Image: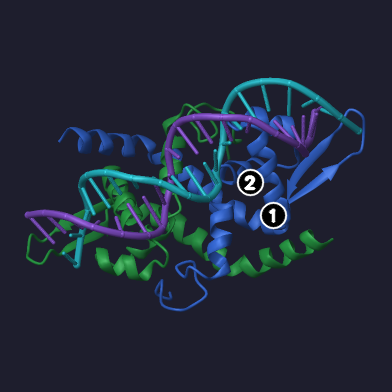
Chain colours: A green, B blue, C cyan, D purple
Amino acid sequence: MRKPGRASGNVFSATCPSRTALELVSSKWALLIVPMLVDGPVRNNDLLRRIEGVSQKMLTQTLRELERNGLVVRTDHLTVPPHVEYHLSPLGRSLSEALIALDRWAEQHHDHLRYAREKFDQG
Amino acid sequence: MRKPGRASGNVFSATCPSRTALELVSSKWALLIVPMLVDGPVRNNDLLRRIEGVSQKMLTQTLRELERNGLVVRTDHLTVPPHVEYHLSPLGRSLSEALIALDRWAEQHHDHLRYAREKFDQG
DNA sequence: CAGGATCCAGTGGGATACTG
DNA sequence: CAGTATCCCACTGGATCCTG
């Protein structure tokens, strides 16, 4: 495998667009929204309820940015009352694997982190 | 596989510690620092140079937090001038796989994102 | 139901200078 | 070399109210 940081065009280069891409997909809410869409289309309100702590503002803002970058597809059914669904594009689906792995890592090891933190803070 | 968002104790729960863990390991600089350490111990100044755009302040702050959570080990050789090295703990190493996957995804697809963005912004 | 608009407090992080 | 300390501002994101 190529060593990190050697060639240009990688995430370690401040000017490379891959840095921007990384920051988008690793943003706090994108990290939770994308994995939430793997099982099929989800509505705005469902995301609002299932992702605890997200505000309507941040949800919309993140979804819009994900849509803008071709990761998420927004489908407006043009009904009254409104019915809007979001689902992953193929590109978004390829990303979801990496994000789910990260989410799962956090779920598996958070107690380990907490224990290390307590040790560090006291001693 | 378990459906996301159903059981408690997952990243989708605002109160669960795994959310905190996720935010730590997905922080902007941790995402770049951890993969940079996979090949062995690295010195402060090397990280400062190889990770473009990071300031000494953020580098120290992120490394300290990673150390506090048991992901990174700091070794001070107690010499003059100072010689400090950082390397991954086994826990940090297990995380690095997920982060490297994410970094690589960004490197592979950033042009795809940029193209989608241009389309979205004009049309 | 989905989300736009506005206001505003809190803070993340850069710049700079200093230290063992 | 590897930090710490201080200042300070731009921007993030919550709260609130409004609309089709």
Q: Is residue A56 left or right of residue A114?
A: left
Q: Residue C19: horizontal and vertical position, in percent? A: 86, 29
Q: Residue A41: horizontal and vertical position, in percent? A: 24, 65
| Quadrant in the picture for residue A119 | bottom right
SS for callout 1: loop
**Mark number, residue A50:** none
**Residue A43 visible from this viewpoint:** no
Do labels 2 and 1 touch, CB within 8 Å?
A: yes
Amino acid identity at mark 2:
Val
**Which quadrant is the C terminus of chain B positioned in?**
top left
Quick check: A96 above or below B4? above
**Which quadrant is the N terminus of chain B positioned in?**
bottom left
Amino acid identity at mark 1:
Leu
Quick check: A13 above or below B26? above
Image mark 1: chain = B
Question: In terms of depth relative to the viewer, which is nearer, D5 or B89?
Answer: D5
Q: Residue at x 45, y 42 (%)?
A: A22
Q: Is residue A73 left or right of residue A6?
A: left
Q: Residue at x 29, y 69 (%)?
A: A46
Q: Residue A21: horizontal and vertical position, in percent? A: 41, 40
The residue carrying mark 1 is B71
The residue carrying mark 2 is B34
